Amino acid sequence: MWIIFACGSALFAGVTAVLAKEGIRTTDSTVATALRTFVVLAGAWGMVFIVGSQAELGHIDVRSTVLLLLSGLATGASWLCYFKALQLGDVSKVVPIDKLSTVMTVVMALLLLGESVSVIGVLGIGLITVGTYAMLDTDDVRQFPRAVRAGGSWLLYALGSAFFAALTAILGKAGITGVESNLGTAIRTAVVLVMAWVMVAVTGKLHEVRSVPRGELGYVLASGAATCASWLCYYRALQDGPASVVVPIDKLSILVTVVFSIVVLRESVTKRYLSGLALLVVGTLAMLIFSPNQ
């Protein structure tokens, strides 16, 4: 049964980006992020009560509290960048760039925390990097400097999403101790909610909340529900199944995203893109399966 939940985790994680893309056709991405975070926050605290870690809330030390708040801000920045990238670019292009957070996390851990990287890890980093580059159009790379000077592009926001996601992981590694993972996620999500609505207010977009089309609002909220469903399936799979199998299956969500972006969103991909996708998947699985922590 655990294998079904593991596949469910990948499925729901994979469709999240597609649902979000449908929800931000005309809706501002910051407004959409703020709205969906209500659903994600409810799911996050639901997980806390499922595992029974709510009692630990009053026993978190000052250092861990500060790091949780900082990681929440990093998570919020990652989500805001991610949804802006989805609004500006194709899902099939944005998601692979976002997956570079795996590479960035390893590099940051090496430089900032003094962690070591195995030969397989270096190989995995290389495959992910080369694969991601292969999935980009040459025009996107060539026009990137000009797009940055013009105020940003989907590629810039996607890279920002990956960077802040990696920073979230590093802050977690830096010393958040004695905090159950689901409780930590719930606290971070609460910070994201506050941050997202502050951004909506500061950018003068509060009036847009009432004018969000019902159809798009449904997709936005559904993307939040999909995130929660993915968490629930992932947790259930880890209860009975080996992490060395569950985690790699969950990471295959990118395949689900690409398939849905082609079938549902009618995005086109090239043979070069598919070759890059294969390298990215192989590199990710190599780092997970052959990790010394597995």
Image (cartoon, rainbow, N blue to C red):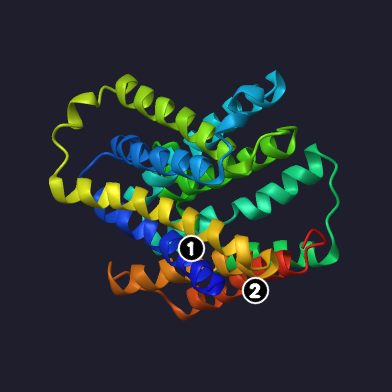
- Quadrant in which residue 129 is drawn: bottom right
Residue at the limit of the structure toward the bottom, as seen here: 271
Q: Mark 1 points at which residue?
A: 9
Q: Which quadrant of the rendered structure holds the C terminus?
A: bottom right
**Residue at left offset 21%, top offset 45%:** 217
Left or right: where 161 falls relative to 28: right
Q: Residue at x 71, y 61 (%)?
A: 125
Residue 153: quarter of image = top left
Tell how many labels: 2
Q: Pointers 2 and 1 in contact (CB under 8 A)? A: no
Residue 25, image x, y percentages:
23, 50
Residue topped by disc 2: 282
The residue tagged with tag 2: helix, strand or loop?
helix
The disc label shown at residue 176, or none: none
Residue at the image point whose x is 50% and y is 77% from the top: 274
Where residue 226 appears, as percent x and y from the top left, is 37, 55
Considering only order in the chain, which callout, 1 or 2, is on the residue closer to the N terminus? 1
At horizontal 41% and vertical 30% (from top left) the residue drawn is 193
Element carrying mark 1: helix
Q: Which of 86 and 47 is in front in this view?
A: 47
Residue 242 place in picture, x, y as percent: 68, 68
Q: Can residue 142 be seen in this view?
A: no
Task: Give the crowd class for mark 1: few <14, some 14-19, many >=20 residues within 10 Å.
Answer: many
